[in-house]
């Protein structure tokens, strides 16, 4: 953590935006390359980035909630500045992990036309599997009245 002071002794923190960004972009491109070359399964590639987004969210949100609690009650602890620093660092990482997460799901949904199942052998919901007109009747409800059934007509 780099803390600088200006002429009025105000704390100015600098964050590692470039190094975090480059590291995560290279890591995502590496796992994407491994997936595309079939060294790892697509599910492993997506699971990795799902786990990373979960971890970064939990840490950043947890630190944010603690900071809000401290600010709300006017508590100034020496750890507050360091907690704020790590909250922002993890949030920067979470941004890039979220972009990778979106790309993973965007990539997997672009394989077929939207709204249509990718496998034509699977029927769409609500459509019957056969062309039998008898199967399209009101799903087991009889059209005969109860009087006709009792008479046996």
Image: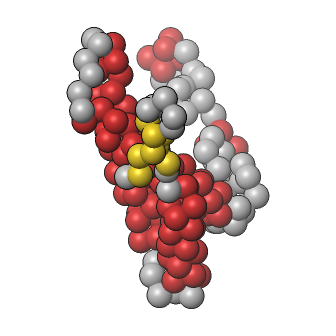
The residue at 44%/32% (across/down) is: 9
Q: Quadrant of residue 21?
A: bottom right
Quarter containing the C terminus: top right
Where is residue 32? Give x, y as percent.
56, 75
Residue 54: give x, y in percent of width and height: 38, 49
- Which is more toward the observer, 1 or 18? 1
Name the side, left or right, on which 36 lies relative to 54. right
Locate residue 53, reporting x and y percent. Answer: 43, 52
Camera-nearest residue between 137 and 108: 108
On the picture, is 80 further left or further right than 29? left
Please say if 128 is above or below 97: above
Which residue is depicted at the point 30% across and 32% down? 80
Residue at the right extreme, as displayed: 113
In this orientation, which residue lies closer to the viewer: 40 or 14? 14
In the depicted structure, whether residue 74 falls above or below residue 100: above
Asked whether residue 41 is in view, the answer is yes
Residue 35 image offset from top left, x and y in percent = 53, 79
Question: Which image quarter: residue 87?
Answer: top left
- Figure disc tally: 0
Q: Is residue 76 above or below residue 87?
A: above
């Amino acid at each position: 953590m780099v803390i600088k002071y200006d002429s009025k002794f105000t704390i100015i923190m600098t964050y590692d935006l470039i190094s975090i960004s480059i590291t995560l972009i290279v890591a995502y491109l590496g796992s994407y390359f491994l997936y595309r070359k079939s060294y790892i399964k697509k599910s492993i590639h997506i699971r990795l980035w799902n786990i990373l987004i979960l971890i970064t969210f939990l840490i950043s949100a947890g630190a944010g909630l603690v900071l809000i609690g401290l600010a709300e009650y006017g508590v100034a602890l020496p750890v507050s500045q360091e907690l704020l620093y790590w909250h922002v660092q993890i949030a920067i990482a979470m941004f890039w992990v979220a972009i990778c997460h979106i790309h993973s799901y965007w990539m997997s949904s672009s394989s077929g036309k939207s709204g249509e199942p990718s496998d034509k052998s699977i029927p769409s919901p609500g459509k019957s599997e056969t062309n039998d007109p008898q199967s399209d009747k009101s799903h087991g409800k009889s059209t005969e009245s109860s009087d006709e059934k009792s008479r046996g007509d």
